[in-house]
Image (tube, grey):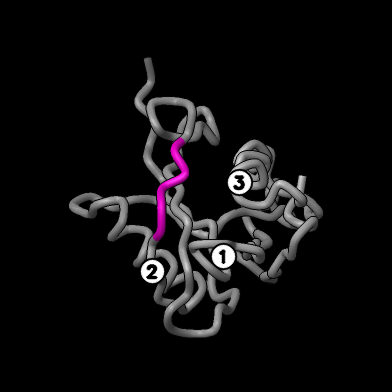
Amino acid sequence: MTLRRLVVAAAIVDDLASPTLLLAARRTRPLHLSGRWEFPGGKVDPGETPEEALHRELREELGVRVELGEEIVGPEHGTWVITDRHVMRLWFARIVEGDPQPLVEHDELAWLGPGEWLDVPWLDADVPIVEELTRQVAPEAV
């Protein structure tokens, strides 16, 4: 069995208790993923906890500070398999400081409203996560 590298990401929403808006980020690289949408985040560096890595990645990628909410637990030992080499842990998050900007690896951000959560071309691995989110918090978005 190949050990997969852990990445972390955030489902950034407008309200942790009753979210209606979800932030999506459009990738610019690598080329085969360019134009597809994803949850912002990135790799966990050695010596970091997943939560520390997520806070760092969101500062670097979007220029924001967030409050983390509940983890969206994946079906594979609590993670979401996103490639043959990577698994992802994902948390709900709410911006507490800053206005999100596409600073690194993204060229556009979009706040998706009720009924729009699946309206952008998400990365294939993120589609089941968005579907799960809509089942959990925004059934009208399915």
Quick one: SS at disc 1?
loop
In percent of width and height, residue 18 lies at 57, 62
Q: What crowding class fits label 3: few (fewer than 14 Cα within 10 Å), some (14-19), or many (20 or more)?
A: some
- The circle drawn on residue 133 is 3
- Using residue 49 as the reference point, say whether residue 95 is left or right of it: right
At mark 2, the secondary structure is strand
| Relative horizontal placement of residue 128, taking residue 6 as reference (left or right) | right
Q: In the image, which disc is placed on residue 67?
A: 2
At 44% from the left edge and 38% from the top edge, which residue is drawn?
Answer: 73
Image label count = 3
Q: Is residue 99 magenta?
A: no
Residue 13's tag is 1
Residue that appears at 49% across and 35% down: 80
Give neighbour class at mark 2: few <14, some 14-19, many 20+ (Cα, 10 Å): some
Magenta span of residues: 69-73
- Real-space Cα separation, disc 2 to disc 1, in angstroms: 10 Å
Amino acid under disc 2: Glu
* Left or right: 69 as drawn, with respect to 139: left
